[in-house]
């Protein structure tokens, strides 16, 4: 019956039975305001309205190809459309109900808005004072901004006259537009939501049924207000056991009390569903891998520390520990326990110092991540010199103490202080070999409260020190070691060469950080230091005054230290890799906007895992052919010297160090995050179009 009445009313309007002044309302759409860029009209879902009831009206924008308009939060640039209604006395209208927007990358910016066609609706309440037979006239003033290569503001005035009838009648033309609109409007969130935030990052976590990989493929959170998130940063998504976690990158010095906005979920078929979100911040940001509680982070750190003992960065230190173990072959239980405790203390104190420094830097607003010390050329040069000095000691050039005999210096020197220093050196050299277990633990630790952060770092130290600390718990194990003898002198000299190899590697890192000038200053400092230690050895072997040897060494150290400031100002070498472009957020956005697949390799010269992955997986012939065949843009984010923009990108993906591998398939909103230890097969599987 209702449809029949609607049809009859439409026929009556078409036949001109009503006053001609009402003719603009025949199609329930106003006259258009048109340009080459957009066509705008005012449209309603009702052909006739009833007193005391409601209907919907909206600004309809039809945008030309290549042009876009904006959401209520325009993103990095732009302005939201505005609609001002002039209504009859007693009528009211709600604010615009904003449809879910699109993410529109443009150069280095990301806008939130609409392309194609969009309808911006309001709900209008009809005054009860109107009577059937009256007219309800809507007048509206609207402004909107349209952008492509340039942005042009547009405006228009609109008018619609709607007949008042005993019952509301739907418009055969307008109602379907609003029905289609309903699929784009955000719905109430059906899941429990919680938000977390910390320095530089936030997280949005949903829990409930229907949150799994089969029903959710992509997710993006559009904040209701500007000035909250880094809109260019990815939002890493993880799904586990009915829990969805979305990682968000905050702008500097932003500490939100709540996350409010629109969450858009896409399924495997590309269908989008939008939800209103309002979640108060109730704790630190959760890691993108899901909720990482303190005990989980501690266990991961413990496992990561154990694995570090097997990584190549720690091998030179294992050489020093091997000599210490050899010395303990015939030692008493008390001495064994003392050495084990001293080494363990050296590891724990060093990890506590690194963790405390990171906490302090974060509190001061400095974005420092794991391995930050290796991004400084002066630190790399200092480490190269320190490792060289250890190698010269093992080669017998000088000794820590007065006795220098063939086996006597090895068996009788070192002591607890030497074991403590060895533990500290192990921590410093272990950083470039960050294990996969450490990434999750450190990522969680650096957004936890300071006490929890320190607990994770200490757990990492316990894992690294555990094999040696085991001797302190069970000193009887030392009896299985060979007895000290002449063989130890040959072993000591042989173990010097891993130290020299480490020093050479660090100078190579320095070459990439500070170019030829860096190598010059690094090698000059090494020569000066070696000369000073050689002089110390001469004095020791001649039995001369101890003060003379110390003075010679001290002078050499001072000369070497004077070279360090030159390294900070030395220009970085231009790193060239065939087929690779330098990474930038702007370049990623530009390539993705053009529809190109993008692979990002966040790496560093001092990261051993990164270098192995490059040679084993990324430079494999099959992988290089896949890059070429699929026209995949390969971008290299080189963090060797600590680029802050790359550091922000790492944190946006829940990482505080390299490596990080990201792949955006053509048209994908979010990247695939590849494992930290790569194989050729894993890379090819990620790059496969299907």
Image: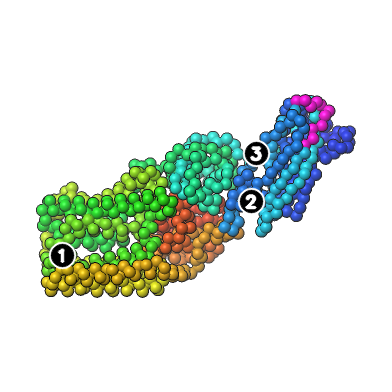
Please state the horizontal and vertical placement of residue 685, each as a whole percent of the image.
47, 56
For image coordinates 43% across by 51% down, the residue present is 365
| 403 vs 564, nearest the viewer | 564
Q: What residue would you read off at disc 2?
A: 78
Under tag 1, what secondary structure?
Answer: loop
Q: Main secondary structure of the magenta part?
A: loop
Residue count near mark 1 (Cα–Cα under 10 Å), binned few <14, some 14–19, many ≥20: few
Residue 283, placed above or below residue 514:
above
Direction from residue 517 to residue 55 in the image, left or right = right
- The mark closer to the camera, 3 or 1, is 1
Measured in 3D between alpha carbons, the distance from the residue under mark 3 to the one under mark 1, in whole angstroms, is 79 Å
Under tag 2, what secondary structure?
Answer: loop
For image coordinates 21% across by 73% down, the residue present is 534
Residue count near mark 3 (Cα–Cα under 10 Å), binned few <14, some 14–19, many ≥20: some
Residue 339 in sight: yes
Under tag 3, what secondary structure?
Answer: loop
Q: What residue would you read off at disc 1?
A: 401
Tell me the quarter of the picture where residue 539 sits: bottom left
What's drawn in magenta, residue-wise? 128-138
């Amino acid at each position: 019956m209702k449809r029949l009445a609607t049809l009859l009313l439409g026929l009556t309007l078409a036949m001109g039975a009503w006053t001609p002044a009402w003719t603009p309302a025949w199609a329930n759409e106003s006259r258009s305001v048109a340009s080459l860029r957009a066509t705008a009209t005012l449209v309603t879902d009702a052909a006739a309205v009833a007193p005391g009831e409601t209907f919907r009206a909206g600004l309809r924008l039809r945008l030309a190809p290549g042009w876009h308009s904006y959401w209520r939060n325009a993103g990095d640039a732009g302005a939201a459309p505005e609609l001002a209604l002039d209504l009859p006395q007693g009528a009211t209208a709600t604010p615009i109900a904003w449809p879910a927007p699109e993410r529109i990358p443009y150069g280095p910016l990301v806008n939130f808005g609409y392309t194609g066609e969009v309808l911006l609706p309001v709900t209008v309440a009809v005054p009860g004072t109107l009577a059937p037979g009256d007219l309800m006239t809507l007048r509206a003033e609207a402004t909107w901004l349209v952008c492509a290569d340039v942005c042009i503001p547009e405006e228009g005035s609109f008018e619609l006259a709607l007949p008042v009838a005993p019952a509301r009648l739907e418009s055969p033309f307008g109602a379907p537009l609003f029905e289609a609109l309903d699929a784009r409007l955000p719905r109430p969130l059906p899941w429990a939501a919680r938000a977390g935030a910390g320095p530089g990052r936030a997280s949005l976590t949903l829990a409930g049924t229907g949150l799994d990989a089969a029903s959710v493929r992509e997710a993006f959170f559009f904040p209701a207000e500007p000035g909250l998130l880094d809109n260019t940063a990815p939002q890493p998504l993880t799904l586990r056991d009915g829990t969805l976690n979305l990682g968000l990158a905050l702008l500097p010095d932003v500490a939100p009390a709540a996350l409010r906005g629109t969450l858009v979920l896409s399924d495997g078929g590309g269908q989008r569903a939008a939800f209103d979100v309002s979640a108060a911040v109730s704790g630190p940001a959760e890691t993108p891998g899901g909720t990482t509680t303190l005990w989980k982070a501690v266990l991961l750190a413990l496992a990561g520390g154990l694995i570090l003992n097997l990584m190549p960065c720690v091998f030179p230190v294992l050489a020093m520990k091997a000599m210490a173990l050899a010395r303990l072959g015939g030692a008493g239980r008390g001495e064994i326990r003392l050495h084990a405790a001293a080494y363990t203390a050296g590891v724990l104190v060093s990890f506590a110092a690194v963790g405390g420094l990171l906490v302090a830097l974060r509190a001061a607003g400095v974005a420092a991540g794991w391995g930050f010390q290796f991004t400084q050329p002066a630190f790399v040069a200092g480490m190269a010199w320190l490792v060289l000095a250890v190698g010269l000691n093992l080669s017998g050039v000088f000794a820590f103490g007065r006795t220098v005999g063939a086996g006597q210096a090895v068996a009788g020197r070192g002591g607890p202080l030497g074991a403590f220093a060895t533990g500290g050196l192990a921590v410093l050299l272990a950083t470039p070999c960050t294990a996969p277990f450490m990434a999750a633990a450190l990522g969680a630790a650096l957004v936890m409260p300071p006490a929890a952060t320190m607990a994770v770092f200490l757990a990492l130290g316990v894992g690294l020190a555990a094999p040696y600390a085991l001797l302190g718990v069970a000193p009887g194990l030392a009896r299985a070691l060979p007895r000290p003898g002449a063989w130890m002198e040959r072993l000591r000299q042989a173990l010097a060469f891993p130290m020299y190899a480490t020093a050479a590697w660090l100078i190579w890192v320095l070459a990439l950080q500070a170019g030829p000038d860096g190598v010059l200053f690094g090698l000059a400092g090494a020569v000066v230091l070696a000369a000073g230690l050689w002089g110390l050895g001469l004095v020791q072997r001649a039995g001369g005054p101890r003060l003379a040897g110390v003075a010679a060494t001290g002078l050499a150290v001072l000369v070497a230290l004077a070279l360090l400031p030159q390294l900070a100002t030395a220009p970085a070498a231009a790193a060239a890799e065939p087929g690779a472009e330098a990474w930038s957020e702007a370049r990623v956005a530009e390539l993705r906007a053009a529809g190109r697949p993008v692979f990002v390799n966040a790496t560093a010269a001092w990261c051993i895992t990164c270098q192995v992955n490059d040679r084993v997986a990324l430079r494999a012939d099959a992988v290089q052919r896949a890059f070429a065949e699929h026209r995949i843009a390969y971008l290299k984010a080189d963090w060797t010297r600590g680029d802050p923009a790359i550091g922000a990108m790492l944190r946006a993906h829940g990482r505080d160090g390299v490596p990080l591998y990201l792949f955006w398939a053509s048209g994908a909103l979010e990247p695939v995050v590849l494992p930290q230890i790569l194989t050729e097969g894993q890379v090819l599987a990620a790059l496969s179009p299907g």
